[in-house]
């Protein structure tokens, strides 16, 4: 996988490059917004690791422009800032994840693996699954025209199931991407949320929209003729 590292601190950049190459990735780097834009204009990347503070501006600006140009690149923002509002800004700008400095390299590599397993982002703004309508841009779900209230994690599970186009998503991938944890608490939470999501999306007496595949994971029901 080809990864772009946008980081102006040479020691941090070298550490990132070495770790990513040892993990089997092809790595390009840029030390400024301008240099990163040139790299992006002349190539495509499976993932981009972007530092927040760069010599010619904020990395979140690059995140926003990159996300506006493509939905295929996974974006991980790095920052020494710890405010919740900063994380919200990064996610609103299109980042897929956010890691605070200083960080453990093993955690960064795990997050990159999880983002790359997530699959491509959905291009559609609205999807229909039987009597369920999913409005991705609004992060809203309706069943028979009535709003269905989903928590952030429930919607994240739904979105991940949709990216696999009906193929099963493993429990391990869901835990990696959405919880970043395989502990008993995360396992129990996954069970509870999956059950709630199934109930919320399935009409009384109807066929379950979320299916369980023993030993494989979970999938979303895609009716013949529908293309999420």
Image (tube, rainbow, N blue to C red):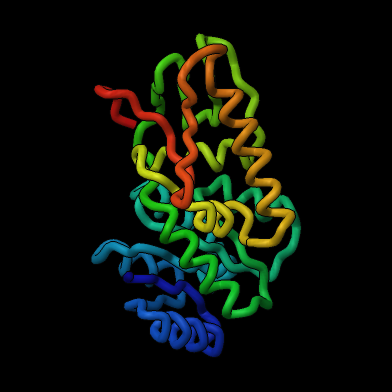
Relative to residue 72, is residue 97 drawn left or right?
right
| Residue drawn where x is 42% and y is 58% of the image | 117
Work out which quarter of the rendered image holds the C terminus and state it.
Answer: top left
Tell me the residue at 65%/24% (across/down). 149
Please say whether residue 160 is visible from this viewpoint: no
Q: Residue at x 59, y 68 (%)?
A: 78
Q: Nearer the viewer, residue 116 or 96?
A: 116
User: Is residue 30 depicted above or below 136 in this figure?
Assistant: below
Whole-percent x, y for residue 91 in the image: 58, 49
Across and down, in percent, residue 146 comes to: 57, 11
Whether 133 is drawn above or below 171: the answer is: above
For residue 62, side relative to residue 97 (left or right): left
Q: How many numbered circles does the render carry?
A: 0
Q: Quadrant of the N terminus?
A: bottom left
Observer-nearest of 102 and 112: 112
Going 49% across and 25% down the picture, which residue do you hit?
Answer: 208
Q: Is residue 24 shown left or right of residue 32?
A: left
Which percent across, then down, holds residue 29? 39, 78
Task: Say which of 57 and 118 sits in front.
Answer: 118
Please tell me whether residue 5 is drawn above or below residue 14 in the rendered image. above
Residue 35 visible? The answer is yes
């Amino acid at each position: 996988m080809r990864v772009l590292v946008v980081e102006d601190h040479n020691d941090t950049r070298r550490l990132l490059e070495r770790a990513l190459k040892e993990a089997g990735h092809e790595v390009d780097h840029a030390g400024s917004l301008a240099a990163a834009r040139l790299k992006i204009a002349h190539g495509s990347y499976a993932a981009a690791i972007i530092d927040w503070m760069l010599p010619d501006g904020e990395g979140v600006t690059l995140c926003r422009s990159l996300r506006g140009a493509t939905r295929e690149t996974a974006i991980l923002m790095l920052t020494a800032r710890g405010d919740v509002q900063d994380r919200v800004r990064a996610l609103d700008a299109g980042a897929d994840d956010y890691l605070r400095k200083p960080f453990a390299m093993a955690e960064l590599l795990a997050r990159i693996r999880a983002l790359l397993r997530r699959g491509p982002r959905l291009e559609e703004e609205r999807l229909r699954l039987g009597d369920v309508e999913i409005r991705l841009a609004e992060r809203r779900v309706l069943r028979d025209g009535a709003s269905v209230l989903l928590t952030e994690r429930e919607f994240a599970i739904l979105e991940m199931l949709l990216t696999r186009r009906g193929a099963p998503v493993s429990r391990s991938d869901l835990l990696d991407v959405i919880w970043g944890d395989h502990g008993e608490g995360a396992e129990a939470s996954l069970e509870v949320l999956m059950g709630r999501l199934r109930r919320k999306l399935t009409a009384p007496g109807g066929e379950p929209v979320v299916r369980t595949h023993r030993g494989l994971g979970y999938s979303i029901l895609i009716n013949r003729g529908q293309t999420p």
